[in-house]
């Protein structure tokens, strides 16, 4: 059974967002079939939150102070927590370790004990560009590199993190606030006519949450002839060093303000039951919090209770609730106006109720449990499920992956490393032909299976030294066919030669003379789960290219397409995510390459249809975030072995647009391949003008899922480690869905 250790820098004596997170995380893991150990940070003074957790199936609660595991004080610091977690892990190892809180996570990463098993959830990190200094970036690089998953509350936070932290790319997944299932029936509330409107706030009392200002609402509403009572639930009143009297003023307002009822702290279900009796929830905050990349759990809870929520107008809230949601506010006057508005207009109230109900349904515990199961399957795959031969082994399969560049193999490597039936090591060459022979020899002596990623010098070295009992699998992309080392590969010692497309498999057989039965096609992987993210407004007008060097990528053709479409509609733009050609010395040393790009940049500067219409974005791993604003991914190359960019775009529901380079029709459906640039431009214009872009994007994603999704490619590769696959089997399993 899968075992999880959960620890948060959280005090479960106090009901706030972090405490609710701990409760929800343990429940989601438990309901996903995981055996959970929750380590508490603080000595328990009330069982309001802990007792329901301890009652969950398969959950063990560690009380460090009560159990005598930590001495002195009543709250653990980060180093104490990590020491205790290591002790528990040494006794019976955990499969995953879920942690919240930057200090505690940093200490765990510093120990190195949990690397690769951490599921890290951080909210106490910088969330603006100006606050993200180099020290913060380096810290998060370390944390991300040690984590299996970086759990992000919102898409906005995930994209922001990936744009700043390279190691977070591919590891960042969504883990939203959760709405628990109710253990009570929702009450029937009478209409707002001829009675007091009941307002409710639950949570901490602090300046940025406007809780002191809320206590003036009953009086402000009375001045507008609206009777109101404000119910406030919670017992955590912040001490504010910059405002020493805040705590006493807040408590006084809770205790003595007319129209304010303070209920104190409550267990979560009891607080929700109380909230369900109210008419309007309050999540009105200081404007300083509008830039937050987090989503309030309380807002979602209110919606699940059929209590419409008054909240700040932010981009995130507009995306969720719609720009016309009637209870968006900014200042105190807006709050009063909004309450008066829905009291006087039942239709406005009904609209707000419907929106809140619809949004909260997307954040239910049932939805979260299914998401948790998906993450568990990805993080902890079982090799025997896709390769039964693994189940019959008495020892782990020892696999070496050797390469100078693993960028196209990274997800497969993650997958192999996660399989319990394998032990995986990497022989990382420092350059195409540069490595440590002693290290490579050590890897060779140890391995059962060697994967040579790229059919270059690494394939030559291992093929000339492979032992009879070992398997050697070599993957050829494209450029290797023109290299001088092909003739030095001992094909007799290669068990299977993997190509990424049928066209290059055939070309490899023709140019090398190697046995066709050894050459199989396994397409490149596409990480659909990472790439499938909500598109940003205006994406249908945005063309995209990933990589423009060398010149055979033909950015000049992409500019031709852009110029044609902008002659008809100047909303179209071209976004290019790339390194510049001069960043590659082996490209920039050629005069014809320099001439090509000089002409391109001069054209962008002088052509009236291209001026201010081309945006260059930095090369990096944050492709999934970048694709959110891209509606079309262009492939205008003279030739490609596979060209992953259109496939990645398809996973994001961007529509591919390809010129017919050799072999393109063996990978991509003909509907995405245009005869020439005029046909491509016409398809783009017609699709957008007639309103079919969303439909085409969905068709593109469906084709991607039927052709080369990550899980299918990983399954094929797992089988390859154990036995040869016939060319017909490999091609048939993952052939493009024409």
Image (cartoon, helix red, strand yellow):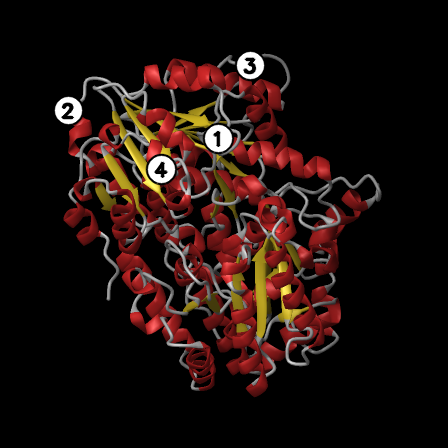
Answer with mark 2 or mark 4, whichever residue precedes in sequence.
Answer: 2
Answer with mark 1 or mark 4, whichever residue precedes in sequence.
Answer: 1
Q: Residue at x 59, y 75 (%)?
A: 326
Answer with mark 1 or mark 2, whichever residue precedes in sequence.
Answer: 2
Percent across and percent down for residue 130 are 75, 49
Contact, CB < 8 Å: mark 3 with mark 2?
A: no
Which residue has dot 2 on it?
392
Dot 1 alpha-carbon crowd within 10 angstroms: few under 14, some 14 to 19, many 20 or more: few
**Mark whose residue sits in front, 1 or 3:** 1
Give above or below for 446 relative to 238. Answer: above
Marks 1/4: CA–CA distance: 13 Å
Give above or below for 367 relative to 389. Answer: below
Give above or below for 558 relative to 225. Answer: above
Between residues 486 and 494, which one lies in front from this camera angle? 486
**Mark whose residue sits in front, 2 or 4:** 4
Between residues 18 and 486, which one lies in front from this camera angle? 486
Percent across and percent down for residue 348 are 54, 79
Percent across and percent down for residue 535 are 49, 66
Percent across and percent down for residue 489 are 32, 32
Q: Secondary structure at mark 4?
A: helix
Q: Residue at x 15, y 49 (%)?
A: 728
Q: Residue at x 43, y 83 (%)?
A: 691
Quadrant of the rendered structure where residue 231 is? bottom right
Which residue has dot 3 on it?
70
Which residue has dot 1 on it?
433
Can residue 364 be seen here? Answer: yes
Using residue 510 as the reference point, say whether residue 215 is left or right of it: right
Contact, CB < 8 Å: mark 1 with mark 4?
A: no
């Amino acid at each position: 059974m899968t075992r999880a250790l959960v620890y948060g820098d959280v005090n479960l004596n106090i009901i706030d967002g972090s405490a609710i997170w701990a409760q929800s995380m343990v429940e989601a893991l438990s309901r996903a079939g995981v055996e959970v150990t929750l380590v508490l940070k603080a000595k328990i003074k009330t069982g309001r939150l802990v007792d329901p957790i301890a009652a969950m199936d398969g959950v063990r609660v560690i009380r460090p102070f009560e159990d005598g595991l930590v001495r002195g004080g009543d709250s653990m610091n980060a180093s104490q927590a990590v020491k205790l977690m290591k002790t528990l892990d040494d006794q019976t190892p955990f499969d995953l370790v879920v942690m919240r809180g930057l200090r505690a996570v940093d200490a765990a990463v510093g120990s190195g004990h949990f690397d690769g098993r951490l599921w890290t959830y951080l909210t106490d990190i910088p969330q603006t560009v100006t606050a993200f200094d180099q020290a913060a970036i380096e810290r998060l690089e370390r944390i991300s590199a040690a984590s299996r998953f970086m759990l992000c509350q919102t898409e906005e936070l995930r994209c922001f993190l990936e744009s700043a932290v390279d190691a977070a790319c591919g590891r960042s997944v969504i883990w939203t606030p959760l709405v628990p299932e109710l253990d009570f029936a929702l009450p029937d509330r009478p209409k707002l006519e001829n009675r007091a409107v009941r307002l409710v706030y639950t949570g901490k009392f602090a300046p940025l949450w406007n809780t002191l200002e809320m206590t003036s609402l009953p009086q402000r509403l009375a001045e507008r002839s609206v009777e109101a009572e404000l119910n406030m639930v919670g017992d955590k009143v912040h001490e504010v060093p910059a405002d020493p009297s805040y705590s006493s003023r807040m408590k006084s307002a809770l205790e003595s303000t007319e129209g304010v009822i303070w209920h104190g702290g409550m267990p979560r279900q009891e607080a929700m039951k109380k909230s369900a009796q109210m008419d309007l929830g309050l999540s009105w905050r200081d404007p300083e919090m509008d830039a937050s990349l987090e989503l309030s759990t309380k807002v979602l809870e209110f919606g699940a209770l059929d209590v419409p929520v008054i909240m700040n107008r932010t981009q995130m809230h507009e995306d969720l609730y719609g720009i016309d949601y009637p209870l968006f506010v900014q200042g105190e006057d807006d709050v009063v106006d909004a309450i008066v508005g829905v009291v006087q207009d039942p239709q406005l109230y009904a609209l707000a109720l419907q929106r809140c109900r619809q949004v909260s349904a997307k954040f239910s515990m049932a939805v979260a449990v299914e998401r948790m199961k998906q993450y568990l399957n990805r993080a902890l795959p079982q090799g025997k499920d896709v390769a039964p031969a693994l189940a019959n082994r008495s020892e782990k399969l020892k696999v070496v992956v050797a390469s100078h560049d693993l960028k196209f193999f990274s997800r497969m490597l993650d997958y192999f490393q996660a399989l319990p039936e394998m032990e995986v090591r990497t022989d990382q060459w420092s350059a195409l032909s540069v490595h440590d022979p002693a290290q490579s020899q050590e890897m060779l002596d140890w391995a059962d299976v060697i994967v040579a990623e790229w059919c270059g010098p690494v394939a030559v070295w291992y093929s000339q030294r492979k032992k009879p009992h070992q398997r050697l699998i070599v993957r050829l992309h494209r450029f290797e066919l023109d290299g001088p080392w092909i003739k030095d590969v001992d094909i007799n010692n290669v068990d299977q030669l993997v190509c990424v497309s049928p066209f290059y498999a055939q070309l490899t057989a023709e140019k090398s003379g190697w046995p066709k039965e050894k050459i199989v096609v396994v397409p490149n992987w596409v990480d659909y789960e990472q790439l499938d993210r909500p598109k940003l407004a205006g994406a249908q007008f945005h063309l995209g290219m990933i990589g423009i060097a060398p010149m055979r990528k033909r950015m000049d053709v992409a500019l031709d397409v852009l110029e044609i479409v902008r002659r008809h509609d100047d909303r179209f733009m071209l976004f290019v995510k790339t390194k510049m050609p001069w960043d590659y010395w082996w490209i920039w040393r050629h005069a014809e390459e320099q001439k090509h790009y000089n002409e391109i940049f001069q054209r962008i500067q002088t052509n009236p249809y291209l001026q201010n219409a081309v945006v260059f974005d930095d090369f990096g791993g944050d492709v999934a975030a970048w694709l959110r604003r891209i509606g079309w991914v262009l492939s205008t190359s003279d030739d490609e072995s596979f060209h992953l960019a259109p496939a990645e775009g398809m996973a994001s529901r961007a529509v591919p647009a390809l010129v017919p380079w050799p072999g393109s029709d063996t990978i991509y459906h003909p509907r995405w391949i245009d005869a020439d640039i005029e046909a491509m431009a016409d398809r783009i214009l017609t699709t957008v003008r007639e309103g079919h872009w969303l439909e085409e994007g969905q068709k593109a994603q469906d084709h991607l899922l039927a052709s080369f999704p990550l899980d299918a490619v990983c399954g094929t590769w797992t089988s390859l480690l154990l036995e040869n696959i016939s060319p017909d089997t490999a091609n048939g399993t993952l052939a493009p869905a024409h």
